[in-house]
Image (tube, grey):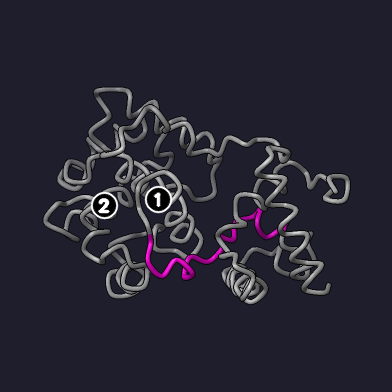
Amino acid sequence: MLKETFLKNVKLLIKMHTDGLLGGELMPEDVLIGVVPEDELMDVLTLAMALNYQRNSYKLWESVVKAYQDESTKWIFNPYAAANSDIDVLRKALLLHRVGLQPNRHPEIWQRVAKGIVKSSEKGDVQGLIESIQSDIAPLKGIMQGTRKSDFPYLSGPKIFNYWLYVLESYTNVSWKSRELITIAPDTHILKATVKLGLCSEEVLNGGADDRQTVATTWETALAGSGLAPIDVHTPLWLWSRAGFPSLLSYE
């Protein structure tokens, strides 16, 4: 496909999303709006995002809202409290509203991420972590995907890490430096939409780590010089796939 035609289709897709024509305009994380105050939103988004792996995102965030509104479980979203909790107490709280589904793995991940956040700054929260790197994605990647990767299980993985950066930008007051480093978050819907647009062959639908990296790299190359960052097309692509790929031509 010629690059001009490809970019035309991408921009058409973005316009369809902007105009609310892709269905499901409500993204999973939207349920937090008006429920979690701004000064706690970064912590809630970050801790829960670490469990957003191979599960229904809408159900995860609905469970997060229930747990946050329950005074007996709200504390799990405080990094310091979660980091210093007895693991059995944390397990019970995570499972109560199904924020965590795996009784052993999920509490372990949650607590490790909480500890990673706490030791990142004197503030002991995500805001402190971001301030410590001056809102610059380059050193943040160096920490979370490099020197301290083991402190941030799942969250440091390429798919969740990049989507986490995008979600923080979308829902909080973060203004990233080195924003071009946010690559597309290649989950199953993104893989399918990428193939549908003709950008990659169907081989990437195997969904292995190499396939996801191929898709992310291909999007970086395809959008170079277009004025669009790869992450800018994530939500339109995701909704397009979820809606069953409604025709782009019918909208022209």
Residue 90, compared with residue 203, is above or below; it is: above
- In the image, 72 versus 102, the foreground residue is 72
Q: How many marks?
A: 2
Q: Is residue 238 left or right of residue 109?
A: right
Q: Residue at x 32, y 29 (%)?
A: 68
SS at mark 2?
helix
* 189 is within the stretch colored magenta: yes
Disc 1, SS: helix
Provide residue 33's location: percent of width, then percent of height: 42, 32
Q: Residues within 10 Å of mark 1 (few under 14, many from 20)?
A: some
Residue density around tag 2, few if under 14, some if 14–19, many if 20 or more, within 10 Å: many
Q: Please report whichever mark, 2 or 1, sits nearer to the chain's N-terminal start.
A: 2
Instruction: Out of 96 and 184, give the one closest to the viewer.
Output: 184
Amino acid type, mark 1: Leu
Q: Residue at x 26, y 55 (%)?
A: 112
| Position of residue 207 in the picture relative to residue 118 (left or right) | right
Q: Residue furthest left?
A: 122
| Residue depicted at 31% across the width and 72% down the height | 139
Q: Which residue is mark 2?
A: 126
Quarter occupied by residue 226: bottom right
Image x and y of residue 53, in percent? 49, 50
Residue at screen point 42% across, 33% down? 32
As measured in the structure, the alpha-carbon distance from the residue carrying label 2 to the one carrying label 1 is 10 Å
* Position of residue 84 measured from the top left corner of the image (x, y, whole percent): 15, 45
The reply to whether dot 2 and dot 1 touch (C-beta < 8 Å) is yes
Would you identify the image quadrant in which residue 141 lies?
bottom left
Give the quarter of the figure containing the N terminus.
bottom right
Of the residues shown, which amino acid type is indicated by label 2?
A: Val
Q: Which residues are magenta?
A: 176-193
Residue labelled with disc 1: 168
What is the x, y in percent for residue 89? Answer: 22, 35
Magenta span includes 155: no
